[in-house]
Amino acid sequence: MSIELASILLLFISFFALLAYGLPVAYSIGISTTLAILMNIVFLPGVTTVAQRMTTGIDSFALLAIPFFVLAGELMNKGGIANRLVNFAKSAVGSLPGGLAYVNILASMLFGAISGSAVAAASAIGSVMTDRMKDEGYPVPFSAAINITSSTTGLLIPPSNVLIVYALASGGAASVAALFIAGYVPGILVGLALMIVAAIISKKKGIASGDRVPVSKLFTDFRKAFFSLLMLIIIVGGIVAGIFTATEAAAIAVVYAGVLGFAYGDISTTELPDILLNSAKTTAIVMFLICTSMAMSWLFSFESIPQLMTGFLLDTVSNPFMIFLLINITLLVVGTFMDMTPAILIFTPIFLPVVMELGMDPVHFGIIMVLNLCIGLCTPPVGTILFVGAGVAKISVSKIIKPLLPFLAAMIFVLILVTFLPSLSLWLPSLFGV
């Protein structure tokens, strides 16, 4: 056995063994990468190489957007924006049969898009909606399932941190602006699919319609939510128009969210230290994941793993349809036990060359990958959003699994559409010329 093959086997065996042992993903990535590099390079240079690759991996102007968007999300979470969006959504769709289910989905889409965080959407909207839905006769596991799946739409609808991470992992093959625009249609499709499932279940359970809202109240709620919604137009519009970069847009989002929070009176100066501390903790976790994943990605290139995978798939499977299906199934399985950021950083260098060889646009593949991994966020054993949603609803994860299945099926259906209909992702970027 060659030293190269032995190091590849050591990399994957040690990585999955450490994950199975319960070690955090970032540590598992870092330790397994270090062990594999040490098989190829003598001890001291090997350790130095890992440290260098971790450092250079996060030495990117584009990645500066992440701490800014995290801070903006914290400010919005504290700044009463969730309540304003829920009230507007309720006025818009709350009178339909199963209306509060639509309200939860629409509010999660709006808040997730504005904050760029699925966790923030699940906790903020779930905290507001769970009691409201329970009071109007909605089963708690059903409302939790809606909250969990709909909160992931904000990872597709820009601005989105994970799309920035994918742009970095693609090595410049996909621009942030193109990915931001490409995410709109798939994100909205996921929301609509979840609404259809919610409507069918609500009708089956006999959940009554809400009261019809006068146009005056709809206008009032829209006016109160207007400046929150305007943030989306400013951030995404500015990036697409070339007025500022994604990183500059993130800094503007922080200023905008802060001004809005203080103007509404929902944030006080005494709360700022906690907001900054929470943002720093989240940023540290994300950045550590990124830097260890970038070291592993470098090792993949060093060992020519992407080229080996491309050759293997193209030689053994001649049908492009089957290759895309195999990649999707692999990512679905990966998403059940690995968080989204490391999964994107590890598997983009492996699968992107394969799909590009088959003629798939890297922007299209980025949307497929993010949507695929969004499903993983909602599934055990590692699904972050699953546990956040269960915690907010104050019920056990086991009680959510059954009502969650129809919504996951809807997300998988949209994933299949997005995979085999490229225009769903690429139409808007081509329209805007990005």
Image (cartoon, rainbow, N blue to C red):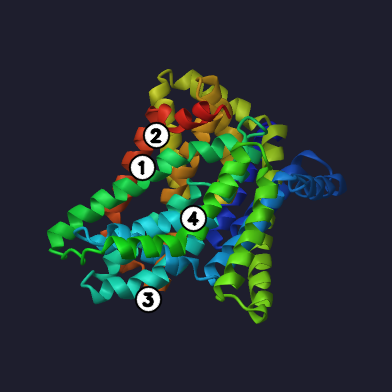
Residue situated in front as seen by the camera: 357 or 21: 357
Q: Secondary structure at mark 1?
A: helix
Q: In the picture provided, is 153 more to the left or to the right than 348?
A: left
Mark found first going from the N terminus, 4 or 1:
1
Mark found first going from the N terminus, 2 or 3:
3
Callout 2 touching callout 3 (CB < 8 Å): no
Q: Which residue is mark 4?
A: 229
Q: In the picture provided, is 342 more to the left or to the right than 389?
A: right
Q: Which residue is mark 1?
A: 189
Q: Which residue is mark 3?
A: 394
Give the mark toward the camera: 2 or 4: 4
Q: Which residue is mark 2?
A: 418
Q: Secondary structure at mark 3?
A: loop
Q: CA distance from mark 2 to mark 4?
A: 26 Å
Residue situated in front as seen by the camera: 77 or 236: 236
View extreme (front): residue: 216
Mark found first going from the N terminus, 2 or 4:
4
Q: Position of residue 377 (x, y in %)?
A: 45, 55
Callout 3 touching callout 1 (CB < 8 Å): no
Q: CA distance from mark 2 to mark 3?
A: 34 Å
Residue occupying image coordinates x 36% and y 56%: 106
Q: Which amino acid type corresponds to the residue marked 1 in the rendered image?
A: Leu
For label 1, the crowd category at 10 Å Cα-Cα, with few meaning under 14, some 14 to 19 and many 20 or more, is some
Give the mark toward the camera: 4 or 1: 4
Mark found first going from the N terminus, 3 or 1:
1
Q: Secondary structure at mark 4?
A: helix
Q: Is residue 345 visible?
A: no
Q: Quadrant of residue 386?
A: bottom left
Q: Secondary structure at mark 2?
A: helix
For label 4, the crowd category at 10 Å Cα-Cα, with few meaning under 14, some 14 to 19 and many 20 or more, is some
The image quadrant where one finds the C terminus is: top right
